[in-house]
Amino acid sequence: MPTAAPAHPARKTTVPARGTTAVVNRLAAEDRAAHEWYRFVLSYPPHLVRDYLERFGLGPESCVLDPFSGTGTTVVECKKHGVPSLGLEAHPLAHFAASTKVNWSVSAAVLAAAAEQVSEAALRQLRHDGVPDDPQRFLAGEGPAEFALRSLPAEQLDLLLENSISPLPLHKVLVLRDAIAAHAKPAVQPYLQLALAKALVGPVGNLHFGPEVGVGPLKDDAAVVSSWHENVLAMADDLRLLRPRRAVRAVVHHADARNAAHFLPPASIDAVITSPPYPNEKDYTRTTRLESVLLGLVTTKKELQNLKRTMLLRSNTRGVYKGDGDDAWVAGHAEIQRIATAIEDRRIALGKTSGFERLYARVTKLYFGGMARHLAELRPALRPGAHLAYVVGDQASYLRVMIRTGQLLASLAEELGYEVVGLDLFRTRLATATKEQLREEVLLLRWPG
């Protein structure tokens, strides 16, 4: 484990500004194919990946790794440009999404035909139930006055944010989900399920992202089957464009980035382009809870607890457990210890006594320890001269104590033998707690071998 010297500011470079924060992170129209099948609200944009593919001189003989793959921005963009790639992702919903988004083997015609067959089956069942898919028809009196709605088992309902989906749309979703399972071949089911996940966080559910997940205005009804069908047909259109690149290797492992060496052959990676979680209170299992439960990826509280235990880094207090030991990796790092002490001192001074607040200092150390462990275990897989780009951001979530994430990770990387090339400014964003502009940067490293 590294025994760190005090952190020092990394050498900084900048890239040309692309405009406002909203614009710089927006998905451009020309990038929508595959990327738009399903995205985290906080995903980084494909153009950022393209910038570094070009800057690092990567091509068909290279291999790019995204150890925090999320919903697959890096691996999708690499495949589009003919660059082989690998991803690691511990979250089952994100892993499912990324894996589906890089699978371009099914033809557009086959997918469109499957969508039509499933749509007909779902609508037939809804007619039998007396539930029109079109809310306007229901308002016009075409539905029954009273009927028995389908719902989830109580334990699964308890996993959802309250009112994240209304009873009538939930009935339709369950009918559609069963129709996919019964009437679609296994090869096309992942596309159809991912299209349903996208509909759930869009026109069907009641979720609001701003950027934290919450419940917005409640929808008494929603057009579930038609919204889903539209998503599938958009996928089919994309596959017509993407299939020429279907043979480009893109594999996403269901794995923890801290154990990357178990999945990567020695000296096999030419570049890393990724965005790890930041040290803040964003619970990614909560952000994706609706889709995870309704697709059957999380069905019990025990499964949810096990997911949190195996989720990547300890980047929020809801994912901290008694046996966690990654903080040992930064026990000798003076600046990280200073920040943790400042957080704890401020907590005591403010009289904050909740269980989560008591963990702020510890999760900060666990986060940076987990990143140190990741960078250490990644080294055998990197080829000499490998380039690394980590999208990271400043944070002040823990009682307004500033955490310069990029600079601290640069310090850790340098101690582990990496060369720090610089910090590119990607964008600035407004801190929720302090209303300050925080830097979001790309930490650039090189592995000398």
Image: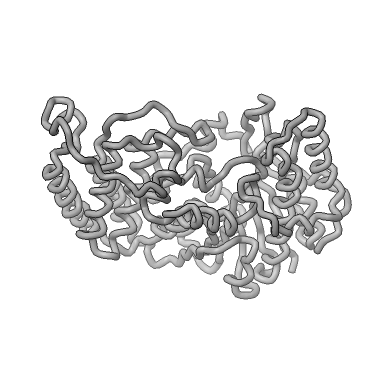
Most extreme residue toward the front, as rendered? 154
Q: Quadrant of residue 435?
A: top right
Q: Can residue 145 be seen in this view?
A: yes
Task: Note whether 317 is above or below 1 in the view shown.
Answer: above
Q: Is 364 in front, or is 249? A: 364
Q: x and y percent of residue 199 in the render?
A: 33, 42
**Quarter of the image where the N terminus is located:** bottom right
**Residue 111 screen position, x and y as percent:** 24, 57
Identify the residue at image location x=75%, y=35%: 402
Residue 153 falls left or right of residue 142: right
Asked which quadrant contains residue 437, the reply is top right
Residue at (48, 33) in percent of width and height: 214
Q: Position of residue 67 (x, y in %)?
A: 59, 59
Toward the viewer: 306 or 227? 306
Name the image quarter holding the C terminus.
bottom right
**Measuring 21% from the left and 31% from the top, which residue is drawn there?**
135
Task: Name the residue: 15% across, 43% down.
Answer: 129
Q: In this view, does 146 lie above or below 155?
A: above
- Left or right, residue 386 beside residue 408: left
Q: Can residue 33 be seen in this view?
A: no
Position above or below: 113 against 376: above
In the rendered image, residue 230, in percent from the top left (x then y), is placed at 26, 43
Q: With 231 as the anchor, is 429 left or right in this view? A: right
